[in-house]
Structure formats: structure tokens, C-alpha cells
Amino acid sequence: MAVLLRNTASATATTTGPSPALLATTLRRGCGCGRLLPRASPPRRAFAARSSAQPLEVCAKESVTVSGRIGDCPFTQRVLLTIEEKHLPYDLKLVDLANKPDWLFQINPEGKVPIVKLEDKWIADSDIITQVIEEKYPEPSLATPPDKASIGSKIFSTFIGFLKSKDPSDGTEQALLNELTSFDSYLKDNGPFINGGSISAADLSLGPKLYHMDIALGHYKNWSVPDSLSHVKTYMKSIFSMDSFVNTRALPEDVIVGWRPKVMG
């Protein structure tokens, strides 16, 4: 059973008698300052939402380790980061993807998240969602210049290749290091962020992927970004410490569980 929390001064997760077939929690979030936490210790923060904006409805994966927490999807976090950095209020519905409810297929036949309702229309795919949000709410701007939009874009795929690899000599680790080294050089000359001195959409896309890389490779490979790539390490620290990132990140336990099939497959 879903519960809608109307009090925008807090963002606690609450469920009332969830059935095995449906576990969805809805939270009212405003201006990106609420944080999803275990219900035993709800935060109390005051914040002011844009009075002219109706809360966006966002459906996201629920944690498989702690009820009422957001799950381990980097694409969902990208969407939430965009909304939070735009200082938009939103209602977050957490869905148990192991027991997808019928209503999820009614609003998205593929049964996937994230999906966001904008002007009475449900939109899927994080690329499309973030583009529509940028167009509808252009301030503050998160637009990344086209010539910079693909910076660091190959890191995620090479991370997955290395994570799945069972052969230390197959070159997958070096492929990842090559991409990270290239990104480090770029940040040295153009940083601290992809678009220079300000956060942009490219950072909000790459940041969650680096978070997954950091946790998954640390756990399954006992691997971390080399200290020699100091600009990448500083970049990751800066992104991971942003309030919006802390508010929307998955638990490390969920990231580990989420990548296990890739490792074991």
C-alpha cells in the first residue's frame, strides 16, 4: 500500500501493511533537501519549494536491503539529481521491482523505472527525462555544451567489462585505466567539472556511474582509482559530497547486490 506524505518539512519513508505483490512508498520532496533514511531516524529539515511548480511524480526502484530507501539505479539517481539541482519539489514513489505492480505497466508498458510524470504525461528513459526537465525548467541551467557532452562517457562500459572479467590478462582493467587517465587529463586542463567551474548535466550523468564503479570494484575486485589520477579522485569526492548526491544515492549494500549477477554470470 502506498502512503503519501504531505509534510514537506520531512522526508521519511513509511509503509502501511505492504502486500507481497506491491511495495511502493511515496514521499513528498521539496527543493531537493530531504534525504531518504531508515525509518528509525527520520531527518527534520526545513526547505522552501518553488511555489509555482507542482511536485513532479517520480517512480524509482526501491532498495532490496532496507525498506523505504531508494534502490541502486544510477539512471534514476541521474534524474533525481537533475530535479534536486533544479530545486523542484517532487513525489517519489518507490517500487519493488521484484514484484512489479499492475499500475506500473499501465504507465510504462515496459515496466521500467525511472519514469516521471510531467504535465499529465509519463516519460521514460533518463536521457529524455532530463532533456525535458531542462527545457521546461531552464533555470538554473544544467546544459552541457555539445562538444563536452561525451566527456567520460566510455568509463561506465569499460568499468562493466572489467567487473565481469574473470581473466586478469584480458585487457579490461587497462581499458578502464585508459578511459580514467583520459578523463583525468581533461579535468586537469578544463576542470574541476566537465563544463569547467560549474556542475552540468554531464556530471549528473557520470557521477552516479562513478559511484557504482567505486563501490562495485572495491568490493568485487579490491580495486580503486589509482592515486596518480588525482583529478579524477578529487572530482569523485566533490560530486559524492554534494547535498543532492547524498540525498539521492543508493546504499553501498544495494550497489553490491545489484552488480552481483554481472559478477557471477
Image (spheres, rainbow, N blue to C red):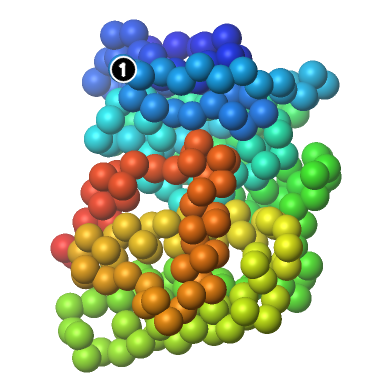
Left or right: 35 in relation to 20: right
Viewer-side residue, 144 vs 105: 144
Residue 182 in which image quadrant: bottom right
Three-letter amino acid code at the position of disc 1: Ala
Tag 1: Cα neighbours inside 10 Å, few (<14), some, or many (≥20)?
few
Viewer-side residue, 17 vs 255: 255
Residue depicted at 22% across the width and 60% down the height:
219
Residue 159 in which image quadrant: bottom left
Whether residue 75 is visible, yes or no, is: no
Residue depicted at 75% across the width and 76% down the height:
147
In the rendered view, tell whether residue 68 sits above or below residue 17: below
Viewer-side residue, 123 vs 140: 140
Whether residue 40 is visible, yes or no, is: yes
In the rendered view, tell whether residue 133 sits above or below residue 163: above
In the rendered view, tell whether residue 74 sits above or below residue 66: below
Dot 1: element = loop
Residue depicted at 34% across the width and 8% down the height:
16
Coordinates of residue 142 in the picture (x, y in percent): 74, 52
Residue depicted at 83% across the width and 43% down the height:
139
Coordinates of residue 162 in the picture (x, y in percent): 30, 76
Viewer-side residue, 231 vs 164: 231
- Which quadrant is the C terminus positioned in? bottom left
* Total residue callouts: 1
Coordinates of residue 89 in the picture (x, y in percent): 67, 26
Left or right: 71 in relation to 115: left
- Which quadrant is the N terminus positioned in? top left
Coordinates of residue 232 in the picture (x, y in percent): 51, 71
For mark 1, what is the residue? Answer: 40
Left or right: 212 in relation to 55: left
